Image (cartoon, grey):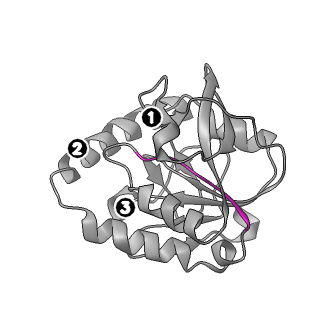
Amino acid sequence: MNPNIRKAALRRALLARRKYHQKINKNTLNQSITENIVNLKEVMQASVVCVYVSIPGEVETHVLIDKFEESGIVVLVPQIIGPSQMQAVRFPGWTAMRPGPLEILAPVTGLEWEHDIDVAIIPGLGFSPVGDRLGFGAGFYDRWLKERCVVTKIGVGFGYQIVSEIPNNLHDVKMDLVVTESHILRVPRDSL
């Protein structure tokens, strides 16, 4: 079966799971995930980190962004600049963020970060144990990751978002790690 058809079916299933799980208070889960992320050696050694700005249903990242800022890490956040195109810009502080084209908070202005990025923290609808990621299908992150030097790519989700297999295409970019509230999955280098 065509990978895109299988992806569409998996997206529907994972969106249904997400809707079901939205009723659960996720404060403890978010705290565990934040702790798991900040304690990763890759993150502790990072000087530049790009972090997605969470929307309802995703792992909350506002506290994580604040923690990175407080520790002196250069924090970058995504900014949509066109159809299926994004760039990473320096986080300007919460007061300078506004809802962007997809209603995701983003800087109103900002120059694209043109240097290497130590860690990128990336959302998804689902992740597999071998680092495959399923997004919403627009390809923002896959395109961006192919164009940028990101040393470590970390997929972040709740435990229910881990599935045994995600169909992939040639343009899909694998994660190096997948972090949930209860697992840190390191992807073997030979499966990247």
Helix, strand or loop status at disc 3: loop
Task: Note whether residue 75 is visible.
Answer: yes
Determine whether 35 is above or below 132 in the image. Answer: below
Q: Nearer the viewer, mark 1 or mark 2?
A: 1
Residue type highlighted by circle 2: Lys
Q: Left or right: where does residue 37 sit relative to residue 48?
A: left
Q: Left or right: where does residue 88 sit relative to residue 181?
A: right
Residue indicated by mark 1: 104
* Membership of 94 in magenta stretch: no
Residue indicated by mark 2: 19
Residue at the (65%, 77%) spot, across then down: 44
Residue type highlighted by circle 3: Phe
Figure disc tally: 3
Q: CA distance from mark 3 to mark 1?
A: 20 Å
Of pointers 3 and 2, the one earlier in the residue sequence? 2
Residue type highlighted by circle 1: Ile
Label 1 with label 2: CB-CB less than 8 Å: no
Residue 73 lies, in percent from the top left, at: 67, 65
Residue 187 lies, in percent from the top left, at: 64, 69
Crowd rating for badge 3 (residues with CA inside 10 Å; few <14, some 14–19, many 20+) = many
Residue stretch rendered in magenta on the structure: 47-54
Residue 186 lies, in percent from the top left, at: 61, 73
Label 3 with label 2: CB-CB less than 8 Å: no
Residue indicated by mark 3: 158
